[in-house]
C-alpha cells in the first residue's frame, strides 16, 4: 500500500519521500491508520519489517496537530515518550524521529546511560516534545526532577519483550506510575510471551492486535544453516569462511562480553579488521565501532545480545552465531539483523556438541529443522563429550559433599573454639596471616 493512502499529512509524506520510501510494509499498512485514530495497539512483527516508522510517523502527526506555544525560559512537559531497552535502539529511534519529523515543529531528545547526564538535563530544560529513553536513565532523570511526565499523551514501548528479558519490569512500573491515566499506548514486541500479555493487560485499553507474521518465526528471506564443529576450532572455521567467501560485512554473536573481546582480538590476528561491542564498552566506543562497521572500515563486528536489537544496518548480508544464545527467542532477534526491508540474508551458526540442547530449543521454537552441513576439514571429533552450559559458561563439575560432613568454614570455627578452650585468654589468629618476628 502507498503511504499516500494511510492518512498521513503532507509534511510527514514529504519526509518519507525524501527518505526514498513510497510503499508501506504490511505492519505499517495495518498499524498506522489505527494509531492515527487514537487507539491503543499491541503489535507483533518480525524485526526488519519497518516497525520503527510504524509508530514514529503517526506519533509525529498526532502531536504536530496540536502544537503548544513555547515561552522563553520555560520548560514544557514531554508529550510523547518512547521506551527502548538498549542505548543503540534508543539512538536509532531518535534518529528516525528526527528524519521523519524534519518538517514538523517538534523537538526530540534521546536519553540513555553510559554518557554524562548533565548534558541531557540541559537539553531537557530547553523543552522537549518527544523523549526517547532507556528505563534506567529515565528514572534517574525523574529523580533529579529534570523531566515532567505528567502530561504524556502517547506512550510507546518498543521491544517490550526485550525490556522484560533485561529485568526492566520494576523500572517500567515505576515509570507508568508517573504517567497520566488518559493516554494512548502503543506496545511493540517481537514475541508475545505470557509475561508480555500480562504487562499489556495492565497498560492497554481495548487494544487493536496486529500481527503480520507467525509468532516467533525468522524472516522468510533469511537462509539458515548449521555447521557442526568442535568448540576449539570455531574461530579457525569462522576466519576460513570470511576469507574464502570474501565477506566484507559480517555480524558475529557471542554469549559473553569476554568472549566477544577475545574473538575480536583473535580475528584481528588472523588479518581481519574486527571490533567488539557489548555492555562493558563505553557508549563512545560502541558508537564508533558501529559507525566503522556501517562505513565498511571494520569487516567483522563481534557482539553480545545487547546488539541483537537496535542495530539497523541496511543490506547486512551475513550474521554468524559463533555461540548459540541461551534463550531461543534471542536467536530470532540475532538473525533478524539480516534479511531486512525485503532483502535476502544469510544466518550461519557454528554449533559444537555442548550446544545441541540449545539448538533443539531453537528448532522447537521455529517449528522447523535447520539444515546442517559439515564442512570438509572441520568434521567434529566424535570422542569429544558434551559439557553442560549454564549462563554462557561450562558447568564446573564438583565432587558431591556428604550432608553429614561439616563445611570448611564450620570446621575452622570448631577448631578455633577448641584451641580457645585449651588456652584461656589466647586469641586464635587466621592461619593465612604471617607470624610477626619478636622485637629485638
Image: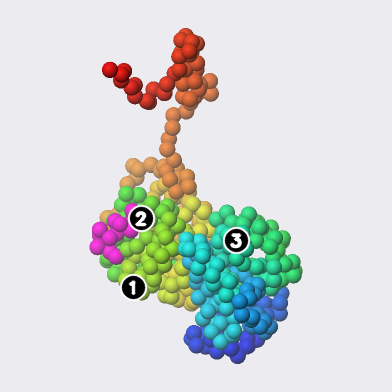
Q: Which residue has dot 3 on it?
A: 144
Q: Magenta segment, principal secondary structure?
A: helix
Circle 2: element type: helix
Instruction: Give the label, 3 or 1, closer to the camera.
Output: 3
Visible residue check, residue 382? yes
Q: Is there a contact, CB below 8 Å, between mark 2 and mark 1?
A: no
Along the viewing direction, whichever of 114 and 98 lies nearer the viewer: 114
Residue range (magenta) = 261-273
Circle 1: element type: loop
Considering only vertical position in the picture, is 82 above or below 356? below
**Residue 300 image point, x, y percent:** 34, 65
Residue under the image location 41 percent in, 54 percent down:
257
Distance between mark 3 and mark 2 Cα atoms: 35 Å
Residue 296: which disc?
A: 1
Visible residue check, residue 209? no
Along the viewing direction, whichever of 125 and 198 lies nearer the viewer: 125
Q: Which residue has dot 2 on it?
A: 261
Quadrant (top left, top right, bottom left, bottom right) of the N terminus:
bottom right
For marks 2 and 1, the one nearer the N-term is 2
- How many other residues sit within 10 Å of disc 3, few (<14), some (14-19) or many (≥20)? few
Instruction: Give the label, 3 or 2, closer to the camera.
Output: 3
Considering only vertical position in the picture, is 182 above or below 202? below
Amino acid at each position: 500500500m502507498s503511504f499516500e493512502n494511510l492518512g498521513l499529512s503532507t509534511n510527514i509524506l514529504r519526509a518519507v519521500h525524501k527518505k526514498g520510501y513510497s510503499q508501506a510494509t504490511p505492519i505499517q499498512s495495518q498499524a498506522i491508520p489505527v494509531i492515527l485514530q487514537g487507539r491503543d495497539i499491541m503489535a507483533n512483527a518480525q524485526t526488519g519489517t519497518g516497525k520503527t516508522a510504524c509508530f514514529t510517523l503517526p506519533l509525529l502527526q498526532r502531536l504536530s496537530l496540536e502544537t503548544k506555544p513555547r515561552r522563553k525560559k520555560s520548560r514544557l512537559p514531554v508529550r510523547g515518550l518512547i521506551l527502548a531497552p538498549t542505548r543503540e535502539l534508543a539512538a536509532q529511534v531518535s534518529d528516525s524521529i528526527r528524519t521523519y519529523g524534519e518538517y514538523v515543529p517538534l523537538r526530540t531528545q534521546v536519553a540513555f546511560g553510559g554518557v554524562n547526564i548533565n548534558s541531557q538535563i540541559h537539553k531537557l530544560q530547553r523543552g522537549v516534545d518527544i523523549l526517547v529513553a532507556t528505563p534506567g536513565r529515565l528514572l534517574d532523570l525523574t529523580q533529579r526532577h529534570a523531566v515532567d511526565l505528567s502530561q504524556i499523551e502517547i506512550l510507546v514501548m518498543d521491544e517490550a519483550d526485550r525490556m522484560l528479558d533485561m529485568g526492566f519490569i520494576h523500572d517500567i512500573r515505576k515509570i507508568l506510575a508517573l504517567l497520566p491515566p488518559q493516554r494512548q499506548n502503543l506496545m511493540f514486541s517481537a514475541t508475545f510471551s505470557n509475561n508480555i500479555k500480562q504487562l499489556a493487560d495492565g497498560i492497554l485499553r481495548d487494544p487493536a492486535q496486529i500481527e503480520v507474521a507467525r509468532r516467533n518465526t525468522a524472516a522468510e528471506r533469511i537462509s539458515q544453516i548449521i555447521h557442526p564443529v568442535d568448540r576449539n576450532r570455531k574461530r579457525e572455521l569462522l576466519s576460513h569462511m570470511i576469507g574464502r567467501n570474501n565477506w566484507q560485512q559480517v555480524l558475529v554473536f557471542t554469549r559473553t562480553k569476554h568472549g566477544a573481546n577475545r574473538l575480536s582480538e583473535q580475528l584481528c590476528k588472523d588479518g581481519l579488521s574486527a571490533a567488539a561491542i557489548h555492555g562493558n564498552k563505553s557508549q563512545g566506543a560502541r558508537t564508533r565501532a558501529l559507525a566503522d562497521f556501517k562505513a565498511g572500515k571494520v569487516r567483522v563486528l563481534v557482539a553480545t545480545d545487547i546488539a541483537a536489537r537496535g542495530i539497523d544496518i541496511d543490506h547486512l548480508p551475513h550474521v554468524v552465531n559463533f555461540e548459540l544464545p541461551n534463550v531461543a527467542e534471542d536467536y530470532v532477534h540475532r538473525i533478524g539483523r539480516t534479511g531486512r526491508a525485503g532483502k535476502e540474508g544469510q544466518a550461519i551458526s557454528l554449533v559444537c556438541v555442548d550446544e545441541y540442547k540449545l539448538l533443539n530449543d531453537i528448532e522447537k521454537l521455529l517449528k522447523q529443522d535447520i539444515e546442517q552441513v559439515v564442512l570438509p576439514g572441520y568434521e567434529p571429533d566424535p570422542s569429544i563429550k558434551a559439557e553442560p552450559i549454564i549462563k554462557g559458561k561450562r558447568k564446573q563439575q564438583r565432587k558431591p559433599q556428604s550432608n553429614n560432613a561439616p563445611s570448611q568454614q564450620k570446621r575452622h570455627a570448631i577448631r578455633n573454639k577448641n584451641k580457645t578452650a585449651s588456652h584461656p585468654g589466647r586469641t586464635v589468629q587466621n592461619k593465612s596471616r604471617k607470624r610477626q618476628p619478636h622485637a629485638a
